[in-house]
Image: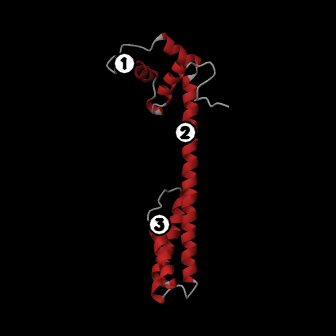
């Protein structure tokens, strides 16, 4: 099944190419006139010229606005799915770091007495990161450094 933003049955290659010039403009500034200018190679200074009759027919007969709106929604939904996946991935990394810190805290053989304070500070930072992501903030700064520092502490002990 084809999507509305793809070439439609009965739509010529030229009409579809012109639609793509319309569809691919930024949604907030998308205009038929700009698509026509790009299609014909007209310069922006040629303000008095309007799109030709064939172009207006393409716009109407092939429902450009509705198709472009469907494309915009598809792009938005895809972006939101990616953002959700990235957020979930960041949360998993935070929880991995929290578990690593807790393992170190509750296993006296894992670290020296002098490392407790630093491990607790790192644990608090990780917990704050989880809270931040759960609020919807997109702040995963320093997460990788924290996990590396916690793992390095484990590796030093294994040494």
x then y, percent, for residue 72: 54, 35
The residue at 55%/81% (across/down) is 104
Query: Residue 67 sits in which quadrant?
Result: top right
Above or below, comparing residue 33 to residue 97 in the picture: above
Q: Earlier in the sequence, mark 1 or mark 3?
A: 1
The residue at 57%/68% (across/down) is 95
Side (left or right) of 139 relative to 95: left
The residue at 57%/69% (across/down) is 96
Circle 3 packing at 10 Å, graded few (<14), some (14-19), many (20+), is some
Could you tell me how far apart the alpha carbons at marks 1 and 2 are, in whole angstroms?
Answer: 29 Å
Q: Secondary structure at mark 1?
A: loop
Proximity of marks 3 and 2: CB atoms separated by less than 8 Å:
no
The residue that disc 1 covers is 42
Q: Secondary structure at mark 3?
A: helix
The residue that disc 2 covers is 75
The residue that disc 3 covers is 144
The residue at 63%/21% (across/down) is 9
Residue lying farthest to the right in this orientation: 1
Could you tell me how far apart the alpha carbons at marks 1 and 3 are, in whole angstroms?
Answer: 51 Å
Circle 2 packing at 10 Å, graded few (<14), some (14-19), many (20+), is few
Q: Earlier in the sequence, mark 1 or mark 2?
A: 1
Residue lying farthest to the front in this orientation: 159
Depth check, front residue: 18 or 114: 18
Q: Earlier in the sequence, mark 3 or mark 2?
A: 2
Circle 1 packing at 10 Å, graded few (<14), some (14-19), many (20+), is few
Q: Secondary structure at mark 2?
A: helix
x then y, percent, for residue 138: 49, 56
Side (left or right) of 133 relative to 41: right
1 or 2: mark nearer the eye? 1
Could you tell me how far apart the alpha carbons at marks 3 and 2 are, in whole angstroms?
Answer: 30 Å
Above or below, comparing residue 88 to residue 67 in the picture: below
x then y, percent, for residue 106: 58, 84
């Amino acid at each position: 099944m084809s999507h509305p933003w793809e070439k439609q049955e009965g739509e010529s290659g030229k009409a579809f190419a012109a639609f793509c010039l319309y569809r691919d403009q930024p949604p907030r500034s998308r205009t038929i006139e700009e698509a026509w200018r790009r299609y014909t190679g007209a310069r922006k200074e040629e303000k008095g010229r309007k799109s030709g009759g064939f172009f207006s027919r393409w716009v109407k007969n092939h429902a450009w606005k509705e198709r472009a709106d469907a494309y915009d929604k598809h792009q938005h939904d895809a972006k939101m799915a990616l953002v959700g996946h990235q957020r979930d991935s960041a949360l998993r990394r935070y929880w991995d770091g929290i578990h690593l810190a807790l393992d170190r805290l509750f296993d006296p053989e894992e670290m020296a007495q002098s490392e407790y304070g630093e491990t607790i500070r790192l644990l608090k930072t990780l917990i704050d990161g989880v809270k931040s992501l759960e609020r919807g903030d997109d702040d995963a700064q320093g997460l990788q450094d924290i996990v590396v520092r916690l793992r390095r502490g484990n590796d030093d002990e294994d040494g």
